Image (spheres, helix red, strand yellow):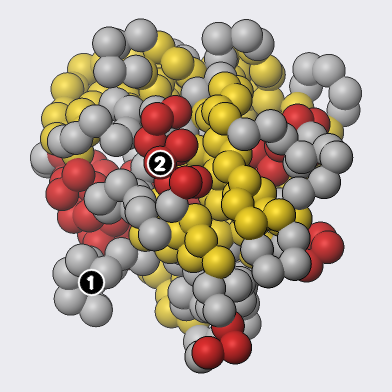
């Protein structure tokens, strides 16, 4: 897989992650699988006054799907600064999202979709809300703390810090808009505290809350593949609703711990395949490993916002499965 293609895939992978990061969902993945849906009542936000970090987390995820807004933002990595125009609207309970890249070649990504369903096997009771399930899951793998009386982009904010309970993921920091609960700023750091990447809203037009119900898609089914990932950091689980079919019969399996994502692909080795090893792309890394199959040599590729040694271990755990024996 050549590096330009890796960058394109990375955009898709990170955009899936940004569904969880609330403000800048930029996904160009296909619409979620059809099936039963549940609804989330945006009117419930009228009754929510967060008083602790768990309530702020649930409130922020709820708010991210219930507010229409337009914003300007910057994404700052170690080698580039990108300027973005963000638009999020809700029509008939369906989210409409547009992201425009304002630097370099013109690119716009648009998505019309139900709320993506993110699920974890250790979630609480079935009838608990998706935001509450997500907040509970995060507490198992991150130490989460809250600081009040902050300010970002001219707006009052609270700061939430996520410190990992192991060495297999990065620390994260969010700044949430006090008035709406939307994320105004997101910083990812390494274990030494150095900033790897910053996403920050620089201008947010007054958000408008949708007063109806928005639809939540059921988990759906992951693409059928003849390979499996045999090791993942604790808390990372397959997200079937956002795993997807790619061109040439390939498929993407996407895993998340609720903040970070790891996306895995397997394809035959070609002249344009990546050399084995780890390739750094700002906060994300790309790890490639080759192994032999019955008729081809294959390349496993993993992309994610985790330490490079972790991603290398993930990709080395990928193995073919004999589908004929099932």
Task: Please give the name of the residue rendered at 36% of the width and 18% of the height, measured from the top-left corner.
Answer: 189
Residue of label 1: 128
**Which residue is the site of mark 2?**
313
Left/right of residue 123 with respect to residue 302 in the rendered view: left
179 or 237, which is in the foreground?
237
Q: Which mark is residue 323?
A: none
* Helix, strand or loop under label 2: helix
Asked whether the residues under the numbered discs 1 and 2 touch, taking CB atoms below 8 Å apart as contact, a structural biologist would say no
- The structure residue drawn at horizontal position 53% and vertical position 89%, both measured from the top left corner, is 325
Is disc 1 surrounded by few (<14), some (14 to 19) or many (20+) residues within 10 Å? few
Classify 265 as above or below 118: above
* Label 2 neighbour load within 10 Å: few <14, some 14-19, many 20+: some
Q: For this rendering, which residue is in front, 10 or 219?
A: 10
Residue 47 in the image: state x and y as whole percent.
23, 56
Given residues 88 and 194, the one toward you in this image is: 194
Please identify the quarter of the rendering in which residue 98 is found: top right
């Amino acid at each position: 897989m050549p590096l330009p293609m890796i960058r394109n895939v990375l955009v898709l992978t990170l955009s899936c992650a940004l569904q969880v990061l609330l403000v800048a969902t930029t996904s160009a993945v296909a619409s979620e699988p059809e099936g039963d849906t549940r609804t989330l009542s945006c009117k419930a936000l009228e009754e929510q006054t967060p008083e602790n970090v768990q309530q702020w987390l649930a409130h922020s995820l709820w708010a991210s799907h219930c507010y229409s807004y337009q914003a300007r933002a910057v994404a700052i990595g170690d080698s580039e600064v990108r300027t973005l125009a963000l638009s999020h609207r809700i029509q008939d309970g369906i989210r409409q999202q547009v992201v425009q890249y304002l630097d370099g070649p013109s690119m716009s990504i648009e998505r019309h979709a139900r709320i993506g369903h993110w699920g974890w096997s250790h979630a609480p009771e079935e009838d608990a809300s998706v935001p509450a399930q997500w907040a509970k899951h995060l507490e198992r793998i991150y130490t989460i703390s809250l600081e009040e009386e902050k300010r970002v982009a001219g707006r009052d904010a609270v700061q939430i810090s996520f410190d990992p309970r192991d060495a297999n993921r990065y620390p994260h920091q969010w700044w949430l808009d006090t008035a709406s609960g939307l994320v105004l700023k997101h910083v990812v750091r390494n274990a030494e505290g150095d900033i790897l990447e910053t996403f920050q809203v620089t201008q947010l037009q007054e958000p408008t809350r949708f007063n109806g119900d928005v639809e939540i898609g059921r988990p759906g089914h992951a693409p059928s593949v003849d390979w499996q990932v045999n090791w993942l950091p604790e808390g990372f689980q397959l997200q079937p609703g956002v795993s997807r079919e790619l061109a040439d019969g390939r498929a993407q399996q996407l895993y998340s711990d609720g903040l970070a994502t790891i996306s895995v692909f397997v394809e035959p080795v070609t002249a344009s395949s990546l050399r084995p090893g780890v390739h750094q792309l700002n906060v994300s890394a790309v790890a490639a490993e080759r192994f032999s199959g019955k008729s081809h040599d294959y390349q496993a590729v993993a992309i994610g916002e985790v330490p490079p040694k972790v991603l290398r271990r993930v990709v080395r755990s990928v193995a073919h499965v004999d589908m004929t024996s099932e």
